Each structure stands twice: as C-alpha cells, then as structure tokens.
C-alpha cells in the first residue's frame, strides 16, 4: 500500500489526547498531526523521536498532517496508523497473496456478526466461511519480539469470544496479528499488560480459533505485507 502523498519527516514534541501529536517539521514549523492509534503507543511516543507525516489538502480535515511512521534511525520503522493493516491485508487477500488464507471467491470487510460486532474480513468460497479479525502490533519490549496488546483491550477480548462462537457454528475463525515493525521476527502476547485478553486468547485456542502472524515491509514510500512470522504462545 503506497501512501497517497509523499511523507515528510518531523520530530515529535508530544502525543496527547490519544489522537493528537505536536511535531516540528524540518523547516522548523510546529504543527499538530492526527494520530490514528487509540493504544498506548508504548515506546513510540517519546519526545525527540523522528517521525514521518502524510500531508493532505482536504478542506474537510482540520488537521493537515497524519502521523504514519516512527523512524528508529537504525534502518527500521514502525507503522503507527492502525487503519493500515486492514487496507494492506485487503489488497493481499484479493490478490490471493496471504499464506494460510488461500484463494476465496469473495472478500467482504466490516461484516456484522455475533453480538453487536463487525468482523474485519469475511471470506467466502469453497467450504465454510472464514472470519478474520486483524490486530495491528506495534509494541516491542525485547529485541526482535513484538507484543500485543500495548494497553488493556476489552474490545479485543470480546472479539476472541466472538471468533470462538463462529467456530462452534461450523465456520473457520482466524486471529491475524500484523506486525507493523521491521525489527521483529516473532510476536507474542503481553499478558502482563492485559491478563484478561490472554485468558480470552487461551479459551479461543481451545475452541479452535486459528492464529496467523505476518510481518510488514515499511518505508516512507509504502507499507506492504511481508513474510509470515513466528507466534509464540
């Protein structure tokens, strides 16, 4: 997925109110950027970090920049926009390029199911329908290891329960962790941050929910799906 407009570099001053970030552009202008990430962004919002912003000229948008990447300045990047995984995965699903999710005739995003929930993708074709829930993973507290979640997520636990119900009804259900970091080769659960999510995950595994994890290739030009990576229970 290529960015709609070329990204511009900046330095982070502060992130606040979850969805706002004050940054300094290379021309020394201070601007406020939209931060499309409701999580804690642990380790990714320290003042002085190099970030990449996507400018826009949409008159309907109050903020003219969107925060897209953290540049770790060692050759690695983290994507902080949580809407990116679904867009990147949708394109790959339509192109039949997702290992573990073979070709399906129909790829439908945001389909209502369960109790007041929406599944990220409902895949239909030969055999049972496949329900795919996608999570963006950006936390890393140990070199090479990504973790989910970075904050308590009651919504995430509910999604796991819903996926378990789909398996009980005879469908296939997949929990898909997309790691938006280029410096991680495996992903696991941050059970110390949200033990309730870990409990829901363990129950989902017993129920027959499948886990898939995949990396991303990230640069200021684009974010695309990379290779499958190891999930460590």
Image: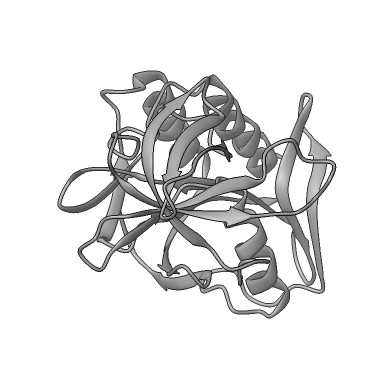
Query: What's the residue at 75%, 66% (across, down)?
Result: 127
Query: What's the residue at 41%, 55% (across, down)?
Result: 26
Percent x, y of residue 188 = 30, 45
Task: Decide if residue 220 is in sight here.
Answer: yes
211 displayed left or right of 144: right
Q: Report the label total.
A: 0
Percent x, y of residue 76 = 28, 64
Name the quadrant of the C terminus.
top left
**For residue 13, above or below residue 28:** above
Q: Determine the image quadrant of residue 215.
A: bottom left
16 displayed left or right of 4: left
Name the quadrant of the N terminus.
bottom right
The answer to which of 46 and 165 lies nearer the viewer is 46
Query: What's the residue at 43%, 29% (across, down)?
Result: 15
Query: What's the residue at 34%, 60% (across, down)?
Result: 77
**For residue 48, above or below residue 156:** below
Percent x, y of residue 8 = 50, 60
């Amino acid at each position: 997925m290529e960015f709609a407009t070329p990204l511009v570099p900046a330095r982070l001053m502060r992130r606040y109110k979850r969805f706002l970030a004050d940054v300094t552009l290379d021309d020394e202008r201070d601007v406020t950027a939209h931060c499309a990430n409701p999580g804690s962004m642990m380790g990714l919002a320290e003042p002085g970090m190099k970030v990449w912003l996507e400018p826009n000229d949409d008159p309907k948008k109050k903020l003219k920049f969107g925060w897209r990447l953290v540049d770790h300045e060692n050759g690695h990047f983290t994507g902080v926009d949580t809407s990116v995984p679904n867009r990147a995965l949708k394109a790959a699903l339509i192109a039949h390029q997702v290992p573990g999710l073979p070709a399906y005739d129909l790829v439908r995003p945001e389909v209502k199911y369960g109790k007041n929930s929406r599944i990220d993708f409902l895949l239909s074709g030969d055999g049972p329908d496949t329900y795919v829930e996608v999570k963006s993973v950006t936390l890393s507290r140990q070199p090479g290891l990504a973790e989910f979640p970075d904050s308590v997520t009651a919504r995430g636990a509910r999604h796991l329960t819903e996926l378990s119900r789909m398996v009980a009804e005879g469908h296939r259900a997949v929990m898909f962790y997309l790691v938006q970091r280029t410096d991680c080769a495996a992903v696991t659960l941050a059970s110390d941050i949200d033990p309730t999510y870990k409990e829901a995950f363990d129950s989902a595994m017993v129920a027959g929910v499948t886990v898939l994890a995949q990396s991303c290739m990230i640069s200021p030009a684009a974010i695309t799906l990379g290779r499958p990576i190891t999930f460590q229970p």
